[in-house]
Image (spheres, grey):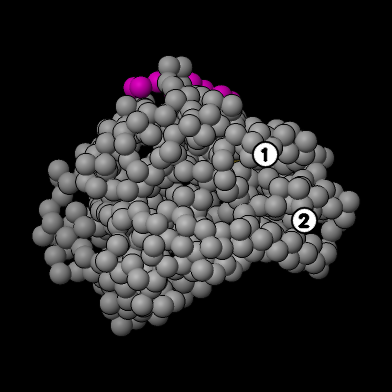
C-alpha cells in the first residue's frame, strides 16, 4: 500500500476551515419509521465520531435500535490500530450479509480508520458487494448525501488524508452527564509503528473560541464533565500561527465552571510545566493523566520515534507526582517491537516497577502495512512476545490492585452515571482519578457528584457506599 507523504509541515490557514451546519438541508421524513444500528470499534475518537453519525442518521428520520437484525441501516465504525481489526470487521460483515438475506433493503455502511485504508476499500469493492456505502474519517459530514445518493450501487467516498475542520457539528451524545469535545483532529507525531497519522491525517486543531463555545453550551445544558479529545491533545494549536497553547486552553475550559475536565491522550514530549500547573491548581481539572510510555527502553523509544528517553519519561513522571496531589497515572505499552531484546523488555518492566501505574493498556506490536516499523525484519517469535505480554500484565495488575487498595475506607467524590451493569441494585460512577466505583444506596443520585466511602478494592474496580 502506498501511504501519502504527509510529513512536509504545513501551517493551516483559517480559509481551510469549513463551517458545516447540520439539519438545515435534510428532511426528517425521508426515513421515518426506519431504524439504525451502529457498531463502534476502537478509541474514544471513534466513539465520538459515532455520536456524530447517529445525529446525521437522525436528521434523516432514522431512530436507533440495539438489534442489528431490526435495522434498516447498519454502520460499522472501524479501527485500524492493530491487525485483529480486520478479523473483527470481516466477522461482523458476515453477520450483515446474513441479515441482508432476510432484509434486502438493509443499507450496510463501513466507516472509520479502516475505510481510509486503500487495500481494505479495494477488498470491500471486489469481494463484499453487499456493502452499500463506504466513507472515511474525513467525510463523515457527507453521510446524508451518500445515503440519499445511493442507487443500487456501492457508493464509496473516501478522501485522501488532507482533512479539514468542521464546526457546528451536531452530536447525538450517548450521555447527558459527560461529553466528549474534540479539540484537534489527526496527528503529526508519526510514531513509526502507528497508522493513525495516515488514517486521520495531519494535525488540525479547532479554534479555541469554538471549543470554549461548545463547552459553555454543555455547561448550560447541565453536563457535569467534558473530556477534551485528540490523538495528541497537548500538541494542541502548534500547527497554527496564532493559537493558544494546550495549557491555556485547559485553563479556559476550567474557567467555564464545568464541574469536571479531563483530556486524552497526551504525549510525554509535549507535556509542559504550565500544563502541570494548570492541572495542579484547578480543582475541576481532574488529577488523572493518561501518559503513554510505549516502551521503557531508550533504544526502542528511538526506533519508535517517540522523542523521549527512559530517563526523560521518568523525570516527567516524577514532576507530575510531586506537583499534582493524589494524581492517578495510566499508560499504554507495546511489547515485541521488532527485534526487542529481553534486556530492552526488562527496561519496560523497570519503568513499570518505578511508576507503579494505576492501570495500563498493553499490546503486542502489530505491523501496520506502510508504516516504517512494519518494514523491519523482525527476528523475535510470537511466543516470546506473548510471554512478555503475560509477564507485563501480571506486573501491571499487581500495581493496579495496590493502587486501588489505597482507596479502602477513604471517602472520595464520585460522579454517578447510571445503573451498574453487574448489579441492578447498584449504580456506577468514576472518581476524580478515573476509578470505576459500584455504589450502593445511590440510585437517586444519577448525574450528581457525591461522597462515597470505599468498602472493597479489586484490580479493575472499587465498591463503595454513599456517605
Ligand atoms: N501495534 C501495537 N500497538 C499499537 N498501538 C498503536 N499502534 C500499534 C501497533 N502498530 C497502541 C499504542 C497506542 C495505543 C492507542 O495503541 O500503545 O498508544
Ligand atoms: Fe500514533 Fe504516535 Fe500519533 Fe499516538 S502520537 S496517534 S501513537 S503517531
- What residue is rendered at 74% in x and 51% in y? 352
> Is residue 10 found inside the magenta-colored segment of the image?
yes
The residue under label 2 is 336
Judge depth for marks 2 and 1 and give the one in front. Answer: 1
Left or right: residue 88 compared with residue 102? right
| Residue 176, numbered circle | none
Label 1, secondary structure: give it: helix
Q: In which quarter of the image is residue 258?
A: top left
Q: Nearer the viewer, residue 292 or 357?
A: 357
Question: CB atoms at circles 2 and 1 under 8 Å apart?
Answer: no
Residue that appears at 51% across and 73% down: 91
- Callout 2 environment at 10 Å: few (<14), some (14 to 19), or many (20+)? many
Magenta stretch containing residue 318, yes or no? no
Left or right position of 18 against 372:
left
Answer yes or no: is residue 106 visible: no
Give the residue at x 30% y 57%: 447
Q: Is mark 2 on a helix, strand or loop?
A: loop
Taken as a whole, is the magenta stretch helix, strand or loop?
loop
What is the x, y in percent for residue 271?
59, 32
Relative to residue 420, is residue 242 depicted above or below? above
Most distant residue in the bottom direction: 102
Which residue position is annotated with label 1?
A: 317
Kindly indicate the quadrant of the structure image that contains residue 175: bottom left
Amino acid at each position: 500500500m502506498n501511504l501519502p507523504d504527509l510529513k512536509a509541515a504545513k501551517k493551516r490557514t483559517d480559509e481551510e476551515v469549513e463551517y458545516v451546519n447540520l439539519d438545515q438541508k435534510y428532511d426528517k421524513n425521508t426515513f421515518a419509521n426506519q431504524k439504525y444500528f451502529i457498531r463502534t470499534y476502537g478509541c474514544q475518537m471513534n466513539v465520538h465520531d459515532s455520536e456524530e453519525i447517529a445525529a446525521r442518521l437522525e436528521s434523516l428520520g432514522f431512530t436507533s435500535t440495539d438489534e442489528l437484525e431490526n435495522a434498516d441501516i447498519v454502520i460499522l465504525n472501524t479501527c485500524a490500530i492493530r491487525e485483529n481489526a480486520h478479523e473483527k470487521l470481516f466477522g461482523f460483515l458476515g453477520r450483515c450479509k446474513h441479515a441482508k438475506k432476510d432484509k434486502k433493503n438493509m443499507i450496510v455502511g463501513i466507516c472509520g480508520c479502516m475505510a481510509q485504508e486503500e487495500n481494505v476499500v479495494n477488498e470491500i469493492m471486489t469481494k463484499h458487494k453487499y456493502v452499500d456505502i463506504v466513507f472515511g474519517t474525513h467525510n463523515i459530514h457527507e453521510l446524508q448525501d451518500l445515503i440519499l445518493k445511493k442507487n443500487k450501487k456501492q457508493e464509496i467516498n473516501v478522501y485522501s488524508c488532507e482533512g479539514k475542520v468542521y464546526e457546528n457539528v451536531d452530536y447525538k451524545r450517548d450521555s447527558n452527564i459527560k461529553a466528549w469535545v474534540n479539540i484537534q483532529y489527526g496527528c503529526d507525531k508519526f510514531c513509526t509503528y502507528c497508522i493513525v497519522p495516515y488514517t486521520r491525517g495531519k494535525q488540525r486543531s479547532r479554534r479555541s473560541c469554538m471549543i470554549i463555545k461548545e463547552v459553555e453550551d454543555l455547561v448550560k445544558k447541565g453536563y457535569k464533565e467534558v473530556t477534551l479529545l485528540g490523538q495528541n491533545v497537548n500538541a494542541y494549536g502548534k500547527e497554527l500561527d496564532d493559537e493558544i497553547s494546550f495549557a491555556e486552553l485547559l485553563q479556559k475550559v476550567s474557567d467555564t465552571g464545568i464541574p469536571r475536565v479531563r483530556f486524552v491522550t497526551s504525549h510525554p514530549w509535549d507535556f509542559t510545566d504550565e500544563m502541570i500547573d494548570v492541572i495542579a491548581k484547578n480543582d475541576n481539572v481532574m488529577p488523572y493523566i493518561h501518559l503513554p510510555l510505549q516502551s521503557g527502553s531508550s533504544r526502542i523509544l528511538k526506533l519508535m520515534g517517540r522523542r523521549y528517553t527512559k530517563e526523560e519519561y521518568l523525570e516527567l513522571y516524577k514532576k507530575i507526582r510531586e506537583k499534582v496531589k493524589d494524581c492517578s497515572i495510566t499508560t499504554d505499552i507495546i511489547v515485541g517491537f521488532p527485534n526487542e531484546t529481553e534486556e530492552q523488555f526488562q527496561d519496560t518492566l523497570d519503568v513499570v516497577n518505578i511508576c507503579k501505574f494505576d492501570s495500563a493498556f498493553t499490546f503486542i506490536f502489530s505491523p501496520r502495512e506502510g508504516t516504517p516499523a512494519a518494514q523491519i525484519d523482525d527476528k523475535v517469535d510470537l511466543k516470546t512476545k506473548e510471554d512478555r505480554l503475560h509477564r507485563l500484565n501480571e506486573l501491571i495488575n499487581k500495581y493496579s490492585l495496590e493502587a486501588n487498595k489505597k482507596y479502602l475506607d477513604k471517602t472520595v467524590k464520585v460522579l454517578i452515571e447510571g445503573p451498574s451493569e453487574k448489579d441492578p441494585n447498584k449504580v456506577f460512577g468514576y472518581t476524580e482519578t478515573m476509578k470505576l466505583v459500584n455504589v450502593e444506596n445511590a440510585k437517586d443520585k444519577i448525574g450528581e457528584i457525591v461522597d462515597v466511602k470505599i468498602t472493597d478494592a479489586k484490580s479493575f474496580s472499587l465498591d463503595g457506599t454513599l456517605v
